[in-house]
Amino acid sequence: GQNIDQPTEMTATEGAIVQINCTYQTSGFNGLFWYQQHAGEAPTFLSYNVLDGLEEKGRFSSFLSRSKGYSYLLLKELQMKDSASYLCAVRDSGWDDYKLSFGAGTTVTVRA
Amino acid sequence: DAGVIQSPRHEVTEMGQEVTLRCKPISGHDYLFWYRQTMMRGLELLIYFNNNVPIDDSGMPEDRFSAKMPNASFSTLKIQPSEPRDSAVYFCASRATKGRNYNSPLHFGNGTRLTVT
């Protein structure tokens, strides 16, 4: 089975930094994705890691350690519009397959 | 780019009725996925297609659920008969395989909120 864990909720202040951790235990690994989902809307893609290390995209960065089964999403210079649920997803399928297993999501609330 | 289009946006039906959800993937995308999202279980993969062929339907809850993809631009998810526990948001998503680029993410539609009373 697949086990993907994230904190349920986090609160931070506008302009601050928040780090959302994700640990996973899956039968296979072919990449880890982060998606953002605003309430009542569809998930939208944020970042992707397949190799160890840090990927930076503007205010958002994502880190992966495959040996530890661990990733984090770093949100810098928080804005009110960043209030959303952040979903960690692992592609746990084989080379020619494509299955994403999602964590339950972390609801981030940004306060003024 | 029109994005993934789902219909209807909302569906309210009575237990025992047949429900059909529709999806039009992004043109040129060769993978199509059906997900279900609930507060209790989060986002669950039901089934996915590659080039219109079902690849993995192990997430389909039971025989009441069926999905088809008759062509590259249309897919349906059918529930017959529907039950209150089927109430959820159903998302369709698509992606394109660009060579061997595994970075290509899923693009989700806006979902269908299904309520079975």
Image (cartoon, coloured by chain):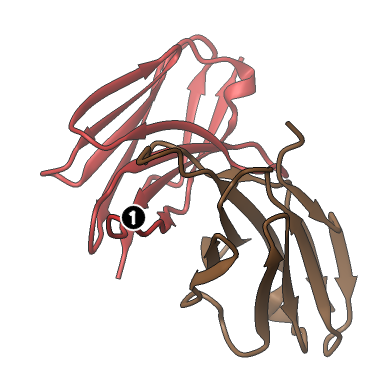
Chain colours: A red, B brown
- Can see residue B42? no
Which quadrant of the view contains residue A70? top left
x then y, percent, for residue B94:
59, 49
Residue underneath mark 1: A4
Given residues A38 and B56, the one toward you in this image is: B56
Write the residue at 48% across / 23% down.
A12
Q: Which class describes the residues within 10 Å of circle 1: few (<14), some (14-19), or many (20+)?
A: some
Given residues B71 and A88, the one toward you in this image is: B71
- Can see residue A23? yes
Write the residue at 19% across / 47% down.
A69
Along the horizontal axis of the image, is B36 left or right of A96?
right
Along the horizontal axis of the image, is B86 left or right of A51?
right
x then y, percent, for residue B82:
77, 84
Task: Name the amino acid, label 1.
Answer: Ile
x then y, percent, for residue A93:
31, 59
Residue B87's place in the image compared with A70, above or below, is: below
x then y, percent, for residue B57:
51, 75
Given residues B74 and A21, the one toward you in this image is: B74
Write the residue at 10% across / 44% down.
A67
Along the horizontal axis of the image, is A9 left or right of B8?
left
SS of the residue at dot 1? strand
Counting every numbered tag in the picture gives 1
Picture quarter with the N terminus of chain B: top right
Picture quarter with the C terminus of chain B: bottom right
User: Which residue is outermost to the left?
Assistant: A67
Write the residue at 59% across / 46% down.
B29
Q: Check the residue under mark 1 and report the chain it is in.
A: A
Which quadrant of the view contains residue A1? bottom left
